[in-house]
Image (tube, helix red, strand yellow):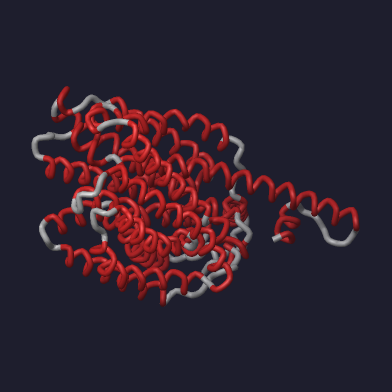
Amino acid sequence: MEKDIQAGYGIAEGSQETTSASSKGYLESLAERKKSVVATGVGNTLEWFDWTIYAVFAPFIAAAMFNPQDKTSALLSTLAVFSVGFLFRPLGGLIFGIFADKLGRKGVLLTTMLMMSAASLMIAITPSYAEIGGWASLLLLIARLLQGFAHGGESTASYAYLSEIAPPEKRAFWSSSMFFCVGIGSMIATLTGVLLTSTLDNAVLSDWGWRVPFFIGALLSLAVLFLRRNMIESDAYEDAQHQTASIIVEKSIKQPTQEWSKNKIVKRAIGIFFYQAATTLPYYIWTAYAAVFAITTRGMDAKYAFLATLGAQLVNIIMVPITGYISDRIGRRPVTIFFFVSMAILTPILMPMITSNPLSLFFVQSIMLAIVACIGGTQPAIIAERVPTKYRARIMGTSMPLAVALFGGTAPYLNSWFFSNNLGWVMYVYIAVTCAIGTFVVFNWKETKGIHLSDVN
């Protein structure tokens, strides 16, 4: 890594003066990279706070923004809007992916933060169903679509950016900071749920209390924009841009690692789609829906359900960098396959163990979120190592958000519908089949830990 940075500074090896200069340049570059990781991470935290808070307060949003006379229908409608928000993630990923590949990662990360915050503010100030009827539901839907659009771009740019600025031998550990911060954002959202349900009664929560976190998310965006304005641009992106410029000027220069056929690009994108489908379905079951399941299906008190989930999310946050570190040592494939097999086997065993007792939710969810950390610790790295820089953001921005929309966004709704109709076993089969497909895909991938992103093929 140090030699790569020295080369980037145009420093020759040999003299003591050169060595001193290279060391200084290396430390300065490393410090800038770490600051950029922090800025990206804080933004990811806020982004996922805004995104997750909707799921956390779904029962209260249902009462405020939909017809409250039919509680089951209102909840399903709220979860349907949650699912529809995912449909704009592929569009956001595609559009912002093109911008990220053409114009750079940094600008996209600034733009998506503004959009996500605007959508949160819109949800916070939209009048209730009692005040404007069906228009409330429509405005909520529009805000959620805007969130999905921004979220697709944010995730795409962050995946690419963090993997590109990380040292190759520590890529999974560094890029796991994204999911570490995702966990922090989700945890803060859950903690907000605990605090509000502990201090406000249900009538106040249903009236205006659920709007408070959306206001907070919109305001905190200002601090994030201040941090992100000084981020460095990805050197892998800049190198790819220089290579492209050289190819245009000198036709004789070839870049076989960057020039892929359309057929190869499509095949790689399809593989990533099925990988993402198999990771996102159980991920959203155990992160975004477990507490809602306990509250609506098992009759658990909302305050204690959120508190149990908060503890389980802490377990996940601790495990994410650990699994990233392990992945940098033993490889991406074994860690990922372990996740798929565990989800397929343990979900039908542990989900029925959730009762009205909050300890049951904490126990079950802690186990599953510890295993979910296998994806948080490996996903940015394994995907970045499958696609060259020239196409990375675009492929990430289409295959991954599309899979999340179809499999992750629908997971809470389907789970709620199946269990409310005594068909929970169908959901278990669905998860098992999806994980089996993911296992097959990853098993046939080459191990890529530690490679330079310029060597992706």
Task: Kindly indicate the quadrant of the structure image that contains residue 269.
Answer: bottom left
- Measured as percent of width and height from the top left, residue 236 is found at 59, 54
Q: Residue at 32% x, 46% y: name it.
A: 304
Q: Is residue 86 above or below residue 341?
A: above
295, 119: nearer the viewer: 295
Position of residue 229 in the picture relative to residue 374 (left or right): right
* Number of marks in picture: 0
Residue 128 visible in the snapshot: yes
Q: Is residue 403 visible?
A: no
Q: Where residue 147 appears, x then y in whole percent?
A: 34, 39
Query: What residue lies at 26% left-to-right and 66% top-to-bottom?
Result: 431
Q: Judge from the rendering whether residue 136 lies leftward or rightward of residue 359; answer left or right.
A: left
Task: Name the residue nearer the viewer: 7 or 385.
Answer: 385
Residue at horizontal 71 percent and vertical 54 percent from the top: 8
Residue, far right: 16
Q: As displayed, is residue 447 above or below residue 71?
A: below
Q: Quadrant of residue 449?
A: bottom right
Q: In this rendering, is residue 228 above or below 363?
A: above
Q: Position of residue 361 (x, y in %)?
A: 31, 56
- Give me the residue at 17% from left, 46% from top: 76
Question: In the image, residue 31 lies at what x, y percent?
Answer: 69, 47
Q: Quadrant of the N terminus?
A: bottom right
Left or right position of 210 against 445 = left
Outermost residue toward the top in this view:
131
